[in-house]
Image: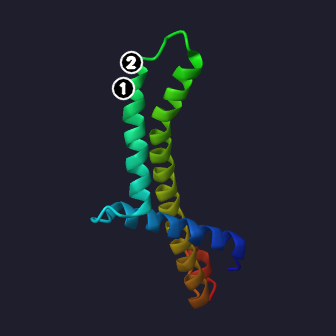
Amino acid sequence: MRHDPTEESALQHAVSLSADIELQLRDVQGSAPLLALLNRANRASAAAIVRLADVNPEDPAAIRSLQNDIRAFDLIVIWLREIVRDGFEAGDWLDNQRREDLADVIGLTDDPEEHNAD
C-alpha cells in the first residue's frame, strides 16, 4: 500500500514532538526549556490573578490584559495536551499502517472470501 510521504512525515513529526514534550516534562532536573516556560507562565498567571483583585474596574484594557496573562498558562497547557494527544494518535495510525502493509506483503487479509479464493 502506497502512502503520501508528506503526510507520513508530518505524522512522524507529531510523534517526535509528543515524545519530546513527554521527555521534557519528565526531566527530574527541571532544567528543560519547556519546564522553564511552564513555570514562568504559571507564575505570571498567579501574579495576574492577584493584581486582578486590585485593578480599577473602570479600566477594561487593564482587566483584559490581566485576563490574557491568566489565560496564557491555560492555553500553553491545553496546546501541550493537544500536541501529546496528536502524537499518540499519529503513532497509533502509523503502527496500524505498518501492520496493514506487512499483512499485504505476506498475503494476510481480514476478508474471509479472499482466503477461500485460493
Residue bearing mark 2:
53
Image height check: is 100 above or below 86?
below
Residue occupying the point 61% across, 84% down: 104
Label 2 Cα crowd, 10 Å radius (few <14 / some 14-19 / many 20+): few
Q: Residue at x 64, y 73 (%)?
A: 9
Q: Is residue 81 visible?
A: yes
Report the Cα–Cα distance between label 1 and label 2.
6 Å
Q: Is residue 4 visible?
A: no
Q: Looking at the picture, which amino acid does disc 1 mark? A: Val
Q: Is residue 37 above or below residue 90?
A: above
Badge 1 element: helix
> Residue 53's image quarter?
top left
Name the residue furthest top: 58
Image height check: is 9 above or below 41?
below
- Residue at 54 percent across and 9 percent down: it is 58
Q: Are marks 1 and 2 in contact (CB under 8 Å)?
A: yes
Lateral position of residue 9 relative to residue 91, left or right: right
Instruction: Kindly identify which residue carries mark 1.
Output: 50
Residue 17: % across, % down: 51, 65
| Residue 47 found in image quarter | top left
- Label 2 is placed on what type of residue? Ala
